[in-house]
Image (spheres, grey):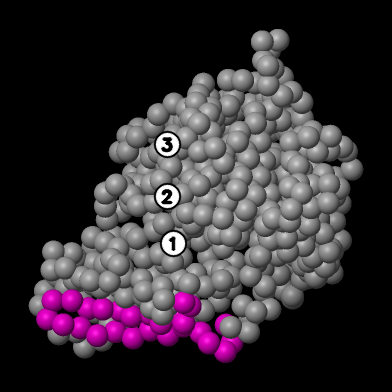
Amino acid sequence: MLNVPSQSFPAPSSQQRVSAGGRSKVPLKPGRSLMDWVKLTKSHKDLSGLKGRFIEVTEEELAKHNKKEDCWTCIRGHVYNVTPYMEYHPGGEEELMKAAGADGTDLFDQVHRWVNYESMLKECLIGRMSTKPATIAKEFNSRTSKDKKPMNGVLDGGLVEAYAKDSPPRYDWFQTENAVTVAVYTKQKDLESEFVTVDLESSILRADILIGNFSYLLHLDLDHAVLEEINELPVILTPQQRLSVCITGIVGKIEIVLQKQDRVTWAKLGEPLDGHNSFIKRTDRGLFYRKCKLISKTSVNYNTKLFCLLLPEGVFLQVPIGQHVYLKDSIAGIEMVKPYTPVFSSLQYNSQVPASKADARKIFLMIKIYPTGVFTQHIDSLQIGDDLYVSSPQGSFQKSQIQAVEELFLLAAGTGFTPMVKLLSDVLTNNSSLRKVKLMFFNKKEEDILWRSELEQLTIQDTRCEVQFVLSEPTDEWTGMRGNISLPLLSTLIERNKEPLNTLICICGPTMFTSQGIRFLEELGFSNEEMYGFTE
């Protein structure tokens, strides 16, 4: 949790980028955009300061380069001179300086481990560490652990650690004349389909199962060819289905049924590949991407569009409520990655099951197109049928946090609205204990409000739902609430019920919006267990 001294923060302007996790960028000077950095890296200038030489760097040598005008840092054993990159870094110079003269690997991983730094900083490479570098991880972790408290029922790390050591998952396999079945025994009785991701491409099978904060991976080059289409099954496999994922949550069993391409007897399941049969912390598992196709894009408002991506036939993937994916593509030779939270094709209600098998393969993303945003401009330029890489789901929000909630308050700024879409739909559809859900939607101007008519219709359709729009720069004709997020405003918008209720407040927007909102809520007497900030 960030400690921000000021008492209010404006709703996001059209120039502020809001990511899936709510991070906003530091304004850069003119001529310091990503594309300007790409041009600089291709200019053949000596950005490392060593004129193309590579050296071994000792811990003592690294520590000497800890100033803004002379800044080296180490990431995974490679040392970079990040001095030339200072003014181009979207997070600001202050963030880079946290790792000045030290090992910044842990800090990097906590903030944006998905970024391809090798590509971004390849012209700044100095060499490798000759000894283990001084690390800032311990200091950083001790500092952040004091500020970042557990929020609203997230599974305790110590319990997961104990589970990982004492009861890891296991798998087995068996075959018939036509099929091979891989059975995974997780021992998790509440296992849901959204925690299972399966990728089948040619003969490569990759199955990633999330158990609390841990990931169990099966990764094999199969012994023989199989058919690639995937179906999800409740229990029964029919002869017409080629590949199926069957999840029996009551016993924590997963069956992946592979239809043989040829009727041959397999001597073994396959050859193990990287990470096979491993059970590690989810954050230690590298991101995995699959190639998806853009099949539609429609306007939501003047600067935001709804993009629909189609998963390959051999992929079974469902993004859990409150979690996000990363989009990846190469722009001007630089691999770029950005996080986005999937939404529905519309603000659905009472629609728990996709209308068809094809719909289950679709991912809808609401993306604001920024005039100077390199990545969003690139996505907007894609044609129907073009490819884009999509990661497996990421995030710490757990559905259990809203299953028994009686009062749900949602604070959103700009595209921080996207995590709220599935939250709204799920609680109104599945939560019989819910008494009230209230969305407080902060924007700059009236035309910035996303899905306004759908939200207004939702309040008519379900009396438990209330929506409050707040504008920081409204016209004179605006009759709704005005202002920025502040303590007085939240005290008006959020009132505790006189009787004790199970309450949760979710907040998402730019970093400052989220951190200040949490601070104001604390001043209003809400506990950490009653709040969840989308800050990843």
Please give the label number shown on residue 194: 1
User: How far separated are the C-alphas under marks 2 and 1?
Assistant: 19 Å
Single out the residue that lies furthest toward the front: 499
- Rendered location of residue 510, percent (x, y): 69, 40
- Asked if residue 169 shows in the view, the reply is yes
Seen from this angle, which residue lies furthest right?
5
- In percent of width and height, residue 497 lies at 73, 47
Start-end of magenta stretch: 164-189
Q: Residue furthest left?
A: 263
Residue at mark 2 = 389
Q: CA distance from mark 3 to mark 1?
A: 20 Å
Residue 28 in which image quadrant = top right
Circle 3 residues within 10 Å: few <14, some 14–19, many ≥20: few
Report the residue at 66% width, 61% height from top.
109
Q: Which mark is residue 346?
A: 3
Q: Say what amino acid the circle numbered 2 marks.
A: Tyr
Q: In this rendering, is residue 484 above or below 211?
A: above
- Please state which amino acid type lies under the numbered disc 1: Glu
Q: What kind of element bears circle 1?
A: helix
- Alpha carbons under labels 2 and 3: distance apart: 23 Å
- Inspect the image, locate mark 3, and give the three-letter code of the amino acid beneath it: Ser
Q: Residue at x 80, y 38 (%)?
A: 491
